[in-house]
Image: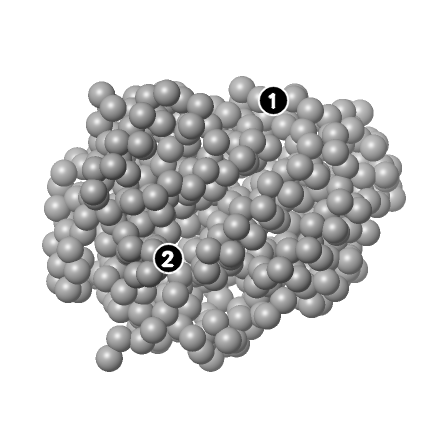
Amino acid sequence: MTRIAIEANFDGLVGPTHNYAGLSFGNVASANNANRVSNPREAALQGLAKMKALADLGYAQGVLPPQERPSVGLLRTLGFSGDDHAVIREAAKTAPALLGAACSAASMWTANAATVSPSADTADGRVHFTPANLCSKLHRAIEHETTSRVLRAAFPDTRRFAHHDALPGWPSLGDEGAANHTRFCGAYGERGVEFFVYGRDDLASAPAPQRFPARQTLQASQAIARRHGLADDAVVFAQQHPDAIDAGVFHNDVIAVGNGNVLFCHEQAFVDQQAVLATLRERLAAQGSELQVVEVSSADVSIEDTVGSYLFNSQLLARSPEAGGGMRLVVPQECRERPAVWRYLESLVASGGPIRELQVFDLRESMRNGGGPACLRLRVVLTEAERAATHPGLWIDDTRYAVLTEWVKRHYRDRLAVADLADPALLNECRTALDELTRLLGLGSLYPFQLGG
């Protein structure tokens, strides 16, 4: 019997050190906006507005807290010493790039937080979480320990939730999380097909990008599938097209998005794309569902417009039967501002296909660093019992939204230049804000400064 389940979205709350240090080579938006002045307050409020709007539409919407930044622990590991303020001052003076990495607010993009497999797919019938090691970038490779504590606090019942440590941070096990993972199914509570997309295979000769690095490895994706107890006939592995990576598609979620039995992708998303789609169709048909593919041609939307608009870094959300069924596509404002993209989207909705509605959000502060609607959320399929076992303080409703909005307005700066990262007062501001946040959310001690680190 099929269990009733829903897909919940857990968005990352943008942290107080949100800045444009241009840390992510291969992410075109991050590089193009390096050294601009950011607005952390506006960034957090934009993210919260999206969470609230989707909760108001009836979606299960949660929030995950940001990480402690600046990471004084990283700087101490790299040889800086003295009290915390002295560490920051010395790093700013002698290694400002390292200070930038220690101040990154990139944990806001929770699509990279972990890979999640629902209980309907796993051998032991629990929801499985593996935090991403993100070892391709220094500023992100330091996230997984706190991410693990956050996820264990958010999903604490070990009878229902299985938490794995991140894979070792070896180059051949580079793991970027759910940004390269999609689950297809008929109903959320049914057994599904998990789709893992990798950029390189370190144990075989394969097409490779020439300009930008491929971050996800096949070996990491295979290890996660084994850890989560996924059946071989319910898993598909596919290689991301190297030309897309070289165009700035650093994660699969910049060129493809799926939900339920619908895949929305560009024609240059995968190597041997038609064979990949045929395998997905076959595997999903074996589970009793038919894959619907909306494949966008380069003639309609170029790779350049794909990267510039983040068309596919969108959220594909199932509409209720009362709303007419089908899918709602949540896109950033930049899609409306690119004529070719918006023309395509209007024709898509009018076509009578599975995508029937558009919803546009202003997420400019995140977008300037290369993160759209899909980057900001981690999807977790939950049964009714699993949802009841999730930490209650993380669900967005009118009260939680009001509390978090007021918290942001009290604690966040409305202007942050890269040079401001050297301000020792920023560390105090961030710790004060995060200490209060953990109390507001009822999560207990999560951060190194709270744990005596």
Amino acid at circle 1: Ala
423 left or right of 195?
Answer: right
Tell me if mark 2 has few (under 14), some (14-19) or many (20+) residues whose alpha carbon lies within 10 angstroms of its own. many
Q: Label 1, secondary structure: give it.
A: loop
- In this rendering, is residue 350 above or below 36? below
Q: Is residue 301 visible?
A: yes
Q: Is residue 450 above or below residue 47?
A: below
The residue carrying mark 2 is 224
Secondary element type, mark 2:
helix
Judge left or right: residue 58 versus residue 342: right
Task: Provide residue 282's location: percent of width, then percent of height.
Answer: 12, 54
The residue closer to the viewer here, 403 or 124, is 403
**x%, y% of residue 63?**
58, 56
- Residue drawn 60% across the image and 22% down it: 34
Quarter-of-image position of residue 119: bottom left
Q: Are marks 2 and 1 in contact (CB under 8 Å)?
A: no
Residue carrying label 1 = 34
Residue at 69 percent across and 32 percent down: it is 39
Question: Quick one: 211 or 279, which is closer to the camera?
Answer: 279
Mark 2 or 1, which is nearer the eye?
Answer: 1
Within 10 Å of disc 1 (Cα), the crowding (few <14, some 14-19, many 20+) is: some
Vertical side of 64 occupied by 338: above or below: above
Q: Is residue 95 left or right of residue 293?
A: right
